[in-house]
Image (cartoon, grey):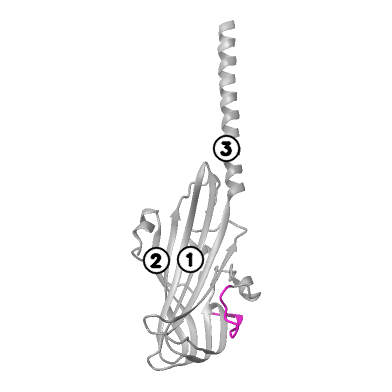
Amino acid sequence: MDRIIKITISLFLIILVSFVATAGYTAYVENAYRSSLSSTYSYTCTITTDSPLTNVTFFLPVPADPSGNSPVITRLSSHEVRGVPDTWTTELYESGKGTFVKVTAPAIIPPEGTTAKDPYAITLSTEVSSKTLINTKDPANESPMYRPVQDLKPAECSDSAVSAAGGQCSMYLTTLYASYQADPHAAVSFRSTLTGKNTWTVFEPKSNEYHTSVYLLMSGDQKDWTPVAGYLEAGIGSYDAPVTGH
């Protein structure tokens, strides 16, 4: 009987120690994850031209989620976005098409020496912390994108490293408005990018992210809404974080 009691007590102690060790490990891992978790958005918008533009108005698409919330709206409203020229007037504009920043300027004059191969570039940029975990797996339905997101369809990834990291790629269409006078041969381009990224450290650094970009090349005078090609890379990185969620 004593032998049975000793075996029972030994098994109980083994189970208890295992439980305490498992609970402690789980608590440590979750605490390390939550204390090190950082979610950020990085935004850029670049306009290039090889010729002078006058009477300029742009409605540039601003990344926003399906509810219209944008990580860069506050920065744009408070003029905290880097690279905005002093001659530009900017204001937010909401329409049925999506969220835009309205840019007006009397002119955009490239410096001497500007050529088609070396155009004049104006780049706006900012980084914004997110208070919540970013959905990097399904940004088209959950996270900021250049909206409206139309004609979304799978595409081959342009970077093999994205596929190797588990990423899924897509193409889509959105829109912008451009109005200005220019030489008939003037080449003007618009490119904007957004990256949403979560990073954390549990024994080693890990992360997941998505990238979306839009691009348009225009020639001569403009005065209309124009379709813009969009590209999306989603689901890149690690998704073994020790919590439920995206």
Residue 245 vertical placement versus 95 (above, below): above
Q: Which residue is mark 3?
A: 26
Q: CA distance from mark 1 to mark 3?
A: 33 Å
Q: Residues within 10 Å of mark 3 (few under 14, many from 20)?
A: few
**Residue visible at 57% across and 83% down?**
102
Q: Which residues are magenta?
A: 82-96
Residue 129 vertical placement versus 62 (above, below): above
Q: Is residue 124 visible?
A: yes
**Residue visible at 53% across and 82% down?**
59
- The mark nearer the N terminus, 1 or 3, is 3
List x then y, in percent, for residue 136: 49, 58
List x then y, in percent, for residue 24: 60, 33
The reply to whether callout 3 and callout 2 are in contact (CB within 8 Å) is no
Does the segment drawn in magenta span residue 17? no
Q: Which residue is mark 2?
A: 170
Q: Nearer the viewer, residue 113 or 137?
A: 113
> Toward which corner of the image does residue 213 lie, by quadrant?
bottom left
List x then y, in percent, for residue 200: 54, 49
Q: Which residue is mark 1?
A: 140
Residue at disc 2, secondary structure: strand
User: Identity of the amino acid at label 3?
Assistant: Thr
Q: Is residue 147 visible?
A: no
- The mark nearer the N terminus, 3 or 2, is 3
The reply to whether callout 2 and callout 1 are in contact (CB within 8 Å) is yes
Q: Nearer the viewer, residue 23 or 45?
A: 45
The furthest residue to the top: 1
Residue at disc 1, secondary structure: helix
Residue 12 vertical placement versus 182 (above, below): above
Does the segment drawn in magenta span residue 88? yes
Q: Residues within 10 Å of mark 1 (few under 14, many from 20)?
A: many
For the N terminus, which image quadrant? Answer: top right
